[in-house]
Each structure stands twice: as C-alpha cells, then as structure tokens.
Image (cartoon, coloured by chain):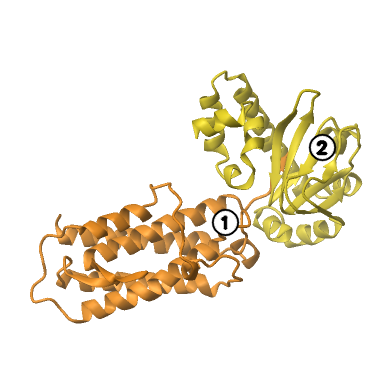
Chain colours: A orange, B yellow
Amino acid sequence: MDATTFLQNLQHRTQQLRATVSTDFAPLEPALLNFKPGPDSWSILECLEHLNRYSRYYNARLTRALASPAARPAQEFSYSWLGRKSIEAVRPENRKPQKTLGRMNPNHSQLTKATVEEFLQHQTELLALLIQAQAADLNRKSIPVEFFRLLRLSLGDTLEFVVAHQERHVQQAERVRQQLRLELSV
Amino acid sequence: MLAALLRQVPFLTEEDVAAFLPLWRRATSLKRGEFLIQAGQVEHHLYFVREGALRIYYPSRAEEICVGFAYGNTLVCSFPSFVAGQPSEYCIQALRKSELLGISRADFSAIVEARPNFARFWRLELERAVMGRIEREIDLLLPEPERRLQRLLTRSPHLFQLIPKKYIASYLRMTPETLSRLR
C-alpha cells in the first residue's frame, strides 16, 4: 500500500488514542483508576502501564532506527510475514486473550496518575516518529522483537504493531471505565 | 471507592457525599460460601460490594436458581426485605471472599427524605433496576438458549470474567454443558 497513506492513518489513530486517554481517563481520581474488575483483571492504570512498558522499548528502538536515514524513502509498504502475525495477535477485534509476558504484566501494581502522563508523553513521541518515518524506508527490517531479539520487524510493521496494541488495551480500559459506576442489583 | 463513585454522580455535592458516607456503618466480611442473607431472614441493610462476588438465588426444592449477581461497585439487597421489612425469599451467597459495607433502612430513608439530591439518586437507580428486570424477564420468555446467551453477552460481558460458569448457566436457565457448547 501507499506509504504516505499508511503513516497518515497511524497518525490519526495515535491522535485518537491521545484524545481518548486525556478526556476519559486523566480526570478520574486514583481510586477509580486503580479499580480492578476482578483479581486477575487489569485496572485502567495497569492497562496504561502495560502499554508504557512496550513504548519504553519500541519508541527507543524506533528513534534509533529513524536516526540513520535511508538512502531513499520507499513509496510502497508491505507487511512482513512476522509483522502481519504480530499485528493480527494484538488487533482490538481479535477477542482471543493473549498471554502476557511476566515482565510486561503490571498486575497488582499500585500505580499513580504519573502513568497517565507517561502514556500521553509516549504518544507525543510516537507522533514525532511517524512524521520522521515519512523520510524512511518502512520495509527495512531493523527492529528486534522485544521478547525474541533474534527476530526483526520492519519499521512499518513496528509502527502499526505499537498503534494496534495500544488500541487494544485502551479499549480494554474503556470497558473498565464502564464499570466505574454504582449498579443496583435486586 | 464508594466515595469516589458517589463523587462521579454529577448532581451530588461534596456536602451530600460527606453527609452520606458516615451512614455506611456496617462493614461485613464473608468467606466463600457464607451468606449475606438466607431465605426467611429479614435484612434491613443495603450493601455496597467493595470487593468479591455474590450470587442471588431462589432455593427451590429441585435446584438453586440464580436470579442475579453482585460484584465490585454493586449495590445489593434483598429488595422486599430492605424496602418492606418482609422475610427474604432469595438467598445471597458469597462466591469468593467478599467485603461489603452496609447502610440501614432507617438511615437511608432519612437521608432520602432530607436531601432531594439523594431522592433523585435513588429514583434513577430504581429506574435502572426496573429496566434491568424487564430486560431479564424478556430473557426468560425466549425459548432459544442462544438468544438468551447473546442478550447477556451484550448487556453484561464482564460477568463472564467474574462469575463461575455454572452459575451463569443457571441464570440463563440452561445446563453448564449447553453453555459450554454455545461458547
């Protein structure tokens, strides 16, 4: 597909995520942000912390990869096989629960509003990276997969993976927010 | 948590919340299997579930039929008991360790009379509860188990993460085997 359209779509989706989180979650008080629907279900802050852990790794890697500009930006972008698989696994529409790696699982943490701030900061970084990516070859395989560094994703794969994964968990956090009200059961 | 949830209600003032909270005096802890109320008892309290999960069931001779559930952030009571002082026909039982906070009927009625904002709050909660009951009644009029399941999945998807499946099956008036098959 066309690389420019691809990046514009990701930019739009990232802006949506930033807007949703600052409108819907940022104003809530800590007791509500830390509410866990069940013992193994994540609170809103845990969802965002999970995403922050991924952003800390991938934003840094993307920054590094984009620092060395490609000889010539590619007009077209295609997903790699691994890219397609990774994105499919984290798309919000995919309702299958995925196992979370130990170090990426924030379950039972006591988190604060700083987590929300950090998330918004990562989105600002990501938007800047998406602009920089316009001058890059998105097909270049240069980002090691976080949990298996011998495998690599392309720039384009990684950018979409990060956005789709964030959409998945922000939607999860929205569902938790729906439960943040008194309900009379008789 | 109760305080935080009350503050989310747009028409309740800080003062309202401050007057309401101390009335929730009855802290109750239940182990799994213990009862909040058994059939035949009168329970004058309305409870807020701080954590845990409970089932509301009718103890018929043939089986225990689930009619509802309570979990974190739910307000629960045996309605005929709370409102009219009648003995409960339902049992409310903890499905896992649960922490609840209760307010007496007397205190609750007093604040609803004294503060119009709470009258409004209670009216809106009751309206929602009646809507829920009508939805539920339609569930039970549908002969097809798939349709009953679909309605529940649409209105309360979170139940499937909080409540063991055999109780959901009872609530949906099907066997656990049928529920497994349909999922």
| Name of the residue lying farthest toward the left | A72
Q: Position of residue A8 (x, y in %)?
A: 23, 60
Report whether residue A83 is seen: yes
Q: Chain of mark 1?
A: A
Q: Position of residue B21 (x, y in %)?
A: 80, 59
Q: Is B106 drawn above or below residue B68 in the view shown? A: below
Secondary element at image label 1: loop
Label 1 CA crowd tier, 10 Å (few <14, some 14–19, many 20+): some
- Amino acid type, label 2: Ser
Residue under label 1, please give it. Answer: A41
- Residue toward you, B173 or B61: B61
Q: In the picture provided, is A22 more to the left or to the right than B100? A: left
Q: Do the residues under discs 1 and 2 have CB atoms within 8 angstroms?
A: no
Q: In the picture provided, is A148 more to the left or to the right than B28? A: left
**Of the two numbered discs 1 and 2 in the rendering, the one whose residue sits closer to the viewer:** 1
- Of the 4 image quadrants, the one containing the C terminus of chain A is top right
Q: Quadrant of residue B83?
A: top right
- Amino acid type, label 1: Ser
Report whether residue A186 is seen: no
The residues tagged by marks 1 and 2 sit, at their Cα atoms, a distance apart of 28 Å
Secondary element at image label 2: loop
- Residue drawn 64% across and 28% down? B136
Residue under label 2, please give it. Answer: B78
